[in-house]
Amino acid sequence: MEQLISMITEKTGLPADKAEEIVGMVIGFVKDKLPGPIASQLDGLLGGGAGAGEGGLMDNVKKGLGGLLGG
């Protein structure tokens, strides 16, 4: 999650505390929209825990998008 917050601060110029607040809101929104079992796995992905792969959330997002986009 720190990598995502850092990326937001770099691209938008927002302070880290505001970027963290935004990320928290987005994660909460996404978790509310996902089925329970999937939503519970989101915490592991964001924290770099079980199932997060080598690099955590951003690596998983890139891999997933690569698969969707044929990469």
Image: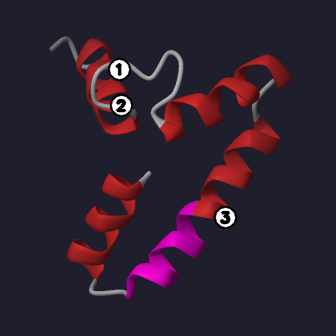
Q: Residue at x 38, y 57 (%)?
A: 2
Task: Tell me how far mark 3 sits from mark 2, CA to CA.
Answer: 18 Å
Determine whether the residue tagged by mark 2 lies in a helix, strand or loop: helix
Does the stretch in magenta take in 21?
yes
Check disc 1 and report the residue beneath it.
64
Check disc 3 and report the residue beneath it.
25
Q: Are marks 3 and 2 in contact (CB under 8 Å)?
A: no
Q: Are marks 2 and 1 in contact (CB under 8 Å)?
A: yes
Residue type (three-letter) at the residue carrying disc 2: Val
Q: Mark 3 or 2 closer to N-term?
A: 3
**Depth check, front residue: 13 or 20:** 20
Q: Are marks 3 and 1 in contact (CB under 8 Å)?
A: no
Q: Residue furthest front?
A: 49
Residue type (three-letter) at the residue carrying disc 3: Met
Determine whether the residue tagged by mark 1 lies in a helix, strand or loop: helix
| Side (left or right) of 11 relative to 20 | left
Determine whether the residue tagged by mark 3 lies in a helix, strand or loop: helix
Q: Residue furthest left?
A: 71
Q: Residue at x 51, y 40 (%)?
A: 46
Q: Would you call the spot at circle 1 few (<14 residues within 10 Å), some (14-19), or many (20 or more)? A: few
Residue 40 position in % (x across, y down) = 75, 28
What's the mark number on residue 33?
none
Q: Which residues are magenta?
A: 15-23
Q: Residue at x 81, y 24 (%)?
A: 35
Residue 51 position in % (x across, y down) = 50, 15
Quarter of the rendering containing residue 26: bottom right
